[in-house]
Amino acid sequence: MESEIFVNQLIDWYRHQKRDLPWRHSKDPYKIWLSEIILQQTRVAQGMPYYLRFVEKYPSVEDLANASEAEVLRLWQGLGYYSRARNLHACAKTVASDYEGKFPSTFEELLKLKGIGRYTAAAIASIAFDQPNAVVDGNVYRVLSRVFGISDDIADSKTLRIFEKKANQLIQGQKPGEFNQAIMDFGAIQCTPRSPSCAICPMTAYCYAFNQGKQDALPVKSKKVKVRNRYFYYFVYEHADRVLMRERGPKDIWQGLFDFEMIESSNPKEQEEVFSAISARDSFTVVDYSEEVKHVLTHQRIFTRFLRVQVNDLGNFEALAESRNLRPYQLEEVQELPKPILIQNYLKQEFF
């Protein structure tokens, strides 16, 4: 009985409080998929401009499939988690070539596509195709654990199926897309991680967490994410209006993006030690050594300094590029390269 009341009150709340988001004005699976991929681990306010730019530049999945990976990464620049952008592009290619440009309509078929996990498959299946597949993400964990008193540890991979089972029981008989969007919005707006709006919540009469005073204790998450520190020291070699850059390889952050030559350390380095890495100092002029910039990723904290170096003649510049596996780029070319936001911010400050 409580489950039925919860669903009815949730849908009623959503119809009055839902966020007006552009992808909600369409049942186009391409736009729904695009929004879900962009908003993974990204706040709506941050992701919205990216969604609008992608839809404008690539109105259909075929348009996105026909783009180059570099173009996609460049448009994605600043969102982070660049593997999402590469998976987005690969998925578009598969849909365009293997599915004649039409997304499959079932949860199981959607799961076969690159970059589409259980949450995204459920979102597309329910919102675009009215399939009764419930989404489970951080918002859903929080709402269901608090309302129904589910204390299973969400850091345990087995717990996902417990919440999926509960959510799928609730979604039966309802408009599945509306239910999924409602519970996502309720977790984002009302039942927030800290200071949830319990005073104006329609579910307090039967909410376990509210009645037991356990809003801060649910959901249960035991494991702490280990964060490591990395220290990057970049060498920005320039001559005339060109700089030397490189494309980052696989098996690390920012694969396929462009940055400068670098030395990395697990501990901070003294300035003299960084400067000593420049050989043939008479061929170079140090223009600037930046203040330290802190860049935070999910599992890493990156502390960065930039050593800006003027190469005194073209011959040395070209020899340096060849010996260090770097490539010279005109400044206007640099603007078009896909780059980590850390590099983009530095270039904007120093060159553009």
Image (tube, grey):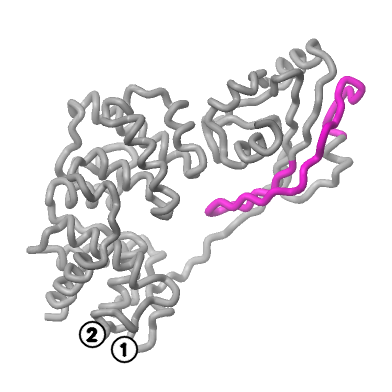
Q: Is residue 318 left or right of residue 6?
A: right
Q: Quadrant of the C terminus?
A: top right
Decide if residue 210 is in sight here.
yes
Q: Residue 78: x, y in percent?
A: 51, 42
Query: Which residue is at 53% across, 54% downward?
Result: 298
Position of residue 290 in the picture relative to residue 252 (left or right) = right
Going 22% across and 51% down the picture, which residue do you hit? 122
Against 77, residue 285 (above or below) is: above
Res 211 label: 1
Between the C-alphas of marks 2 and 1, the distance is 7 Å
- Residue 259 vertical placement versus 136 (above, below): above
Q: Quick one: 27 or 84, which is closer to the camera?
A: 27
| Precedes in sequence: disc 2 or disc 1 | 2
Q: Amino acid at mark 1?
A: Asn
Residue 293 part of the magenta segment: yes
Q: Nearer the viewer, residue 178 or 121?
A: 178
Circle 2 residue: 206
- Does 211 lie within the magenta span? no
Where residue 307 sits: x, y (%)?
78, 36
Q: Residue at x 44, y 39 (%)?
A: 83
Amino acid type of the residue tagged 2 in the rendering: Tyr
For the residue labelled by badge 2, is the local secondary structure a helix, a strand or a loop?
Answer: loop
Q: Residue furthest left?
A: 173
Residue 318: assigned label: none
Residue found 22% across the figure and 42% down from its top: 110
Other-residue count near label 1 (Cα within 10 Å), few / some / many at <14 / 14–19 / ≥20: few
The stretch in magenta equals 276-305
